[in-house]
């Protein structure tokens, strides 16, 4: 009898994963001038002991103006690179979990307050604020300060920012890069007809709206080592009539696959405040399923996946190849341990934590050493 599919190993490109559980990037809004702090050391170190197969560093801005908030992590200069290096050095001393980074530019959703202070846009002429950019000069909400429409020089600056950040990610020894093309941020803004009203070669038709995100992908794929995967996170739907939808997502995913994308992570929404999202358990899985049926590369499902049997079913039925945890693993940082115990599988755990397991579960853990140490 075969074991649970959720704990079968697999490869994303040439990257070997121990199981099908990945940790999604989650912004912490705790950086100082783009630099990681001790909070990130605690946060990422904690999650690196979770038993998941891959840890992805939060949305990391490739340019200062690409941050969502003034407290976002960046990777645009030697200072921001050194701060990440410090964090990674400590995490890696105690975990061999592969680590990826999500590279991002917030576009018109940049220059905002941190969420627990309201998350409102900060005007460019006030403290912590700056002028935002976007495909078109359309604000995210009617009351926001309008972004500046990117010209060719501005687009080149953004593309080159992604390339430089990818080179820094390689110097940091990161195992994979994910490009953020979801949740209403800059690359998604180019994709959606709701935010892209350009009249040049980068707006109008689906082919034109895909052009700049594909240029960014191609440039990053060329800059990052061929042996390491570059993946992309997409919103499968804007949940607004006339916006980005599943059919367009499939077309874009197929174009990415043809260019060497190693996996597609399917989320949704975030582009337009008029969205009507049918939130519920597995609500985004149909979007992942649609993409998986159209491509041969791995597809990641995410969104209100909280139950162990639910996760096993998503993998077992072929709706997705991997499941991503975000808020759920913040709530329960040992979710993969508990899923393994429930499903009769095994995960890797540090020797120092083995004594936490009831004696009947200890055989489920692969770590060597005494549980009494």
Image (cartoon, helix red, strand yellow):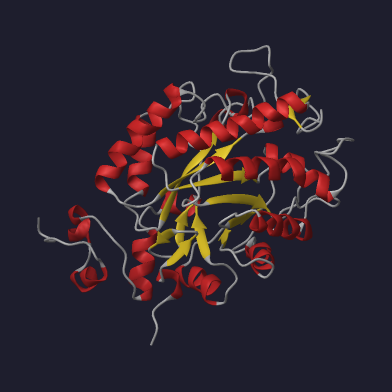
215 up-or-down from 34: above or below: below
Name above or below for residue 206 compared with residue 304: above
Q: Position of residue 15 (x, y in %)?
A: 43, 57
Determine the image quadrant of residue 104: top right
Give the residue displayed 66% in from the left and 26% down from the top: 157
Quarter containing the N terminus: bottom left
Towards the viewer: 112 or 267: 267
| Residue 345 image-quadrant placement | bottom left
> Closest to the observer: 336 or 158?
158
Is 197 located above or below residue 291 in the figure? above
210 on left or right of 341:
right
**Is the C terminus in the top left, top right, bottom left or bottom right quadrant?**
bottom left
- Seen from this angle, which residue lies furthest bottom? 1
Q: Position of residue 222 (x, y in %)?
A: 57, 43
Q: Quadrant of residue 170?
A: top left
Expressed as whole percent of the image width and height from the top left, the position of residue 169 reads: 46, 38
Q: Residue at x 43, y 53 (%)?
A: 329
Query: Is 166 placed left or right of 157 in the picture?
Result: left
Q: Is residue 343 left or right of residue 214?
A: left
Q: Residue 220 or 204: which is nearer the viewer? A: 220
Residue 7 locus on image (x, y percent): 40, 70
The answer to whether residue 361 of the structure is visible from this angle is yes
Number of labels in the image equals 0
Residue at the image point whose x is 49% and y is 30% from the top: 75
- Inspect this view and state whether residue 150 appears: no
Q: Give the side of residue 26 with respect to residue 364, left or right.
A: right
């Amino acid at each position: 009898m075969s074991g649970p599919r959720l704990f079968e190993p697999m490869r994303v490109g040439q990257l070997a994963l121990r199981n099908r559980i990945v940790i999604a990037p989650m912004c912490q809004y705790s950086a100082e001038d783009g630099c990681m702090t001790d909070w990130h050391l605690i946060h990422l170190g904690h999650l690196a002991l979770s038993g998941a197969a891959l840890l992805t560093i939060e949305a990391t801005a490739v340019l200062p103006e690409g941050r969502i908030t003034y407290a976002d992590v960046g990777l645009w200069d030697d200072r921001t690179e050194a701060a990440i290096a410090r964090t990674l050095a400590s995490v890696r001393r105690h975990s061999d979990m592969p680590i990826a980074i999500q590279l991002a530019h917030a576009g018109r959703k940049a220059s905002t307050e941190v969420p627990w202070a309201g998350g409102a846009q900060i005007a460019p002429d006030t403290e912590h604020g700056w002028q935002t950019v976007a495909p078109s000069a359309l604000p995210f909400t009617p009351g926001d300060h309008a972004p500046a429409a990117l010209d060719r020089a501005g687009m080149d600056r953004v593309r080159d920012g992604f390339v430089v950040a990818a080179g820094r990610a390689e110097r940091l020894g990161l195992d994979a890069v994910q490009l953020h093309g979801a949740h209403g941020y800059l690359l998604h803004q180019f994709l959606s007809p709701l935010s892209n009203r350009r009249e040049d070669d980068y707006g109008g038709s689906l082919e034109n709206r895909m052009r700049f995100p594909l240029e960014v992908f191609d440039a990053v794929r060329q800059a990052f080592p061929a042996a390491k995967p570059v993946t992309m996170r997409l919103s499968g739907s804007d949940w607004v009539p006339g916006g980005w939808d599943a059919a367009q997502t499939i077309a874009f995913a197929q174009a990415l696959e043809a260019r060497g994308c190693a996996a597609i992570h399917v989320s949704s929404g975030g582009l337009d405040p008029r969205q009507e999202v049918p939130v519920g358990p597995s609500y985004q899985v149909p979007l992942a399923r649609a993409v998986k049926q159209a491509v041969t590369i791995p597809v990641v499902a995410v969104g209100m996946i909280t139950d162990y049997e639910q996760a096993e079913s998503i993998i077992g039925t072929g709706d997705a190849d991997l499941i991503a945890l975000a808020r759920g693993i913040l709530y329960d940082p040992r979710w993969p341990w508990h899923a393994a115990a429930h499903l009769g599988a095994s995960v890797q755990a540090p020797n120092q934590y083995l004594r936490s397991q009831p004696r009947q579960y200890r055989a489920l853990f692969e770590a060597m050493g005494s549980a009494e140490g």
